[in-house]
Image (cartoon, rainbow, N blue to C red):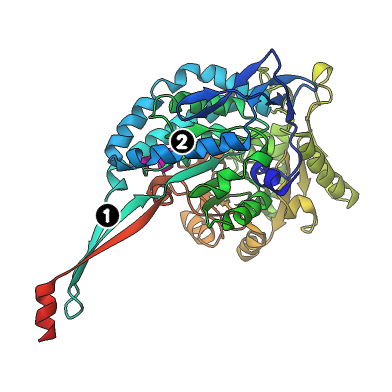
Amino acid sequence: MTDVENAVVSTNAADGRSDTVVGSPVGSGVRTGLFIGGEERFTPEVLRIADPGKPGVVVGEAASASPGDVSDAVAAARSAFPAWAALSAQERAGMMADAIAGIAEERDADAAILSQENGKIRFESWVDALVFEIRWDLALMLADQVDTGHTLPVVPGAIPVSTEVSYQPLGVVTVIVPFNWPIAILGAALPHALLAGNTAIVKPPPSAPLATTRVVQRVAAKLPPGVLNVVTGRDENMAGLITDVDKVCFTGSVNGGKRIMQMASQTLTRVTLELGGNDAAVILDDAILDDTHLDRLYAAIYDTTGQICMNAKRVFVHRSRLNEVVTGLEQRLNQAVIGYGLDEATTMGPLHQAAQKAFVEDIIQEAKDAGADVREYGELPTGDLAGGNFLRPAIIVDPDPGLRVVTQEQFGPVIPILPFDSEDDAVRLANDTWGGLCGSVWTASPESATRVGSQLVCGYVWVNDHGATRLDLRAPFGGMKQSGIGREQGIEGIRAFQDTRAIATIDPTALAQMAH
């Protein structure tokens, strides 16, 4: 791939070539176009979207934008910006509420499409679309705060000036989302950008763009033309979505985020980056390990076949509780059904791309070659699913901490479980990593939870819980260290799409009196 391709393609998974194929249109499956300036636009070339569970099957096709199409999208958003920004936040919120109304009517179809193009089970895909609506509605609840500034009063004895501090939108914003939870992740940024007064261009993931494009287009069609646009296509044509806009909000891999920053630096385009994680779950000696909590831990590790940025990637367990955790996870892994995402019995679908499957297989094999205690579960599907991106889930008990399964983000259904002997050791081990997205503390003691949780170097900490489905969607979210820059959600997420303006008014009478 070119640097531009990698910059825009890269998701939370290890960087790798997209399974998407570029070609001429085909006659079957789902078909989506671009949406620019209030109009749908189809293109001569398309992206043929592969089904990760069924080799050779094409789910559908998405339009493949040219650089000219990208320029048109930026121009449409620029043209729509002045009128949109001139509205009050309450006026924008009213129009956005009308635009999201009825979005659930096609949710079952959206979920089925997303399951086929992504690979994850249908229920997760349905929740993916639901969370977009929830986040949209939560953002609208902040409308009264969006335009609220404050006044800096005159300081006695200083220059007699009072200053009004207010907020203004940035302009045109690009929102780039990954394949794993694309619609839900979009909801963490898009409504906040629009409510703040910006216009937007959405860039769905090239390997799974269909369901996201459908959802966004239905919303965009109800907003003034150009306020919300959707562009899909070959990423070598997408540089304008980074260099020709006022801000880029990117969710993806660390390497992808670095390339986004490199490209954005050419024009000093602002960035928010929500990148990968190597999240630690810290299980103290007094942790409650009943079925409820073990179910939460299992989901935190294996939801979406392990392909979630905020999944637990390393589990640190007090040595006295190690066997309980291993046994609890084994009981659940023995019940896992690996299969096609649309099959009702399936609990774990395929990995999204063949390159990611190969990476996860490689780090598991490395652990085996090093003599680690590697345990794998479940049976791979056969028939028309043979050769799909399926992988048996695994746990690796007490591995060498230098192995890649510990040091790198697996982004797949494998977890290292590492014992510790003291609380200080647990904190040190948890923080000994490149990332700082999320973490969790499992304990029966609120005091221990606060003590340990406050020492974890990450942007979000759960207590006795962990995982994307347990996120407080009102709270600011984002990473530390190489897990990202900036915050999404909440009023902090609104301010990320605004700039401050200070208007200072001097009191000439008071100034004259000071002169005497």
Please name whichever residue, 9 or 120, is drawn nearer the observer in this view of the structure: 9
Q: Quadrant of residue 92?
A: top left
From the top left corner, tell me how far across and down residue 346 is, in percent: 69, 22
Indicate the secondary structure of the residue bearing disc 1: loop
Indicate the secondary structure of the residue bearing disc 2: helix
Please name whichever residue, 402 or 154, is drawn nearer the observer in this view of the structure: 154
Q: Are marks 2 and 1 in contact (CB under 8 Å)?
A: no
The span picked out in magenta is: 191-195
Q: Tell me the quarter of the image containing the C terminus.
A: bottom left
Which residue sits at x=58%, y=52%? Answer: 437
Mark before the other along the chain sequence, 2 or 1: 2
From the top left corner, tell me how far across and down residue 3 is, in percent: 71, 49
Q: Is residue 126 above or below residue 294?
A: above
Mark drawn on residue 361: none
Residue 246 visible? The answer is yes
Amino acid at the residue labelled 2: Ala
Q: Is residue 496 above or below residue 347?
A: below
Q: Write down the residue under mark 1.
A: 149
Horizontal placement of 447 versus 48: left or right?
Answer: left
Residue 194 shown in magenta: yes
Q: Quadrant of residue 95?
A: top left
Question: Which of labels 2 and 1 is toward the front?
Answer: 2
Residue 60 shown in magenta: no
From the top left corner, tell me how far across and down residue 116 is, in percent: 67, 22
**What type of secondary structure mainly makes up the magenta span?**
helix
Q: Write down the residue under mark 2.
A: 76
From the top left corner, tell me how far across and down residue 483 is, in percent: 60, 54
Question: How far apart, in angstroms, are the residues tagged by discs 2 and 1?
Answer: 30 Å
Which residue sits at x=72%, y=22%? Answer: 24
Residue furthest to the front: 68
